[in-house]
Image: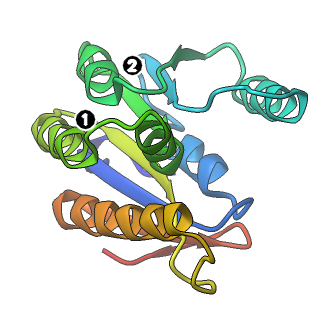
Amino acid sequence: MVPLMTQPRLTLILGGARSGKSTHGESLADGHQGPLVYIATAQAYDGEMTTRIAAHVARRGAVWRTVEEPLDLPGAIMAADKDGSFTLVDCITLWLTNVLLGEHDVAARTSRLLEVVGGCTGPLVLVSNEVGLGIVPENALARRFRDEAGMLNQKLAQVAERVVLVTAGLPLQLK
């Protein structure tokens, strides 16, 4: 647990699928005295994703207020960043997927996101997948996603006060 007085304004948590990123992010809120806001960017397009989302909600419990926002992440962050709230966004790469598949202007959307997170009073925790450790994807959309995610993670890491890599449930502080 990080004491409230030393909680960074902005934390970026990176890791692979099922690495423990979300659980670690939630643990950073332990002892926080203000409201807890969980901004979920996932969309349930099938039963398996519905089950995953329900498991996340059940694990967090009623102490967290969940805001579902697949596209206007900057707006959701601005709305949550008040009254001493601890805000956790899960996850940046699902949001990026929504932006790409919706054929929105990725550069404009990521620029706006960076502007908003840079101005937050926090604490704000961003969870994102590290997608650049595997093989080169075989199709153009997957390669574009990997490249956009990697570049966005780098930009977020530059403005974050703390960056953590989670592997096998073990957090390693990078910054």
Going by the numbered disc 2, the residue's amino acid type is: Gly
For the residues marked 2 and 1, what is the alpha-carbon distance in whole angstroms? 11 Å
Going by the numbered disc 1, the residue's amino acid type is: Gly
> Which of the labelled discs sits on residue 167, or is there none?
none
Residue 115: quadrant of the picture: top left
- For label 1, the SS is loop
How far across and down, in percent of the image, does residue 161 sit?
A: 22, 60
Q: Which of 80 and 1 is in front in this view?
A: 80
Q: Name the residue under label 1.
A: 122
Q: Nearer the viewer, residue 74 or 38?
A: 74
Residue 75: quadrant of the picture: top left
Residue sitting at 60 percent across and 77 percent down?
Answer: 137
Q: In this view, does 105 lie to the left or right of 70?
A: left
57 up-or-down from 164: above or below: above
CB contact under 8 Å: marks 2 and 1: no
How far across and down, in percent of the image, does residue 133 sit?
A: 56, 83
What scheme was used to colour the molecule? rainbow
Q: Nearer the viewer, residue 51 or 159?
A: 51
- Counting labels gives 2
On the question of residue 90 being in view, the answer is no
Q: Which of marks 2 and 1 is nearer the N terminus?
A: 2
- For label 2, the SS is loop
Q: In this view, does 11 lie to the left or right of 69?
A: left
Residue sitting at 49 percent across and 34 percent down?
Answer: 31
How far across and down, in percent of the image, does residue 1 sit?
A: 52, 51
How far across and down, in percent of the image, does residue 113 sit?
A: 23, 39
On the question of residue 50 being in view, the answer is yes
22 up-or-down from 79: above or below: below
Q: Name the residue under label 2.
A: 34
Residue sitting at 49 percent across and 55 percent down?
Answer: 128
Q: Which of marks 2 and 1 is in front?
A: 1
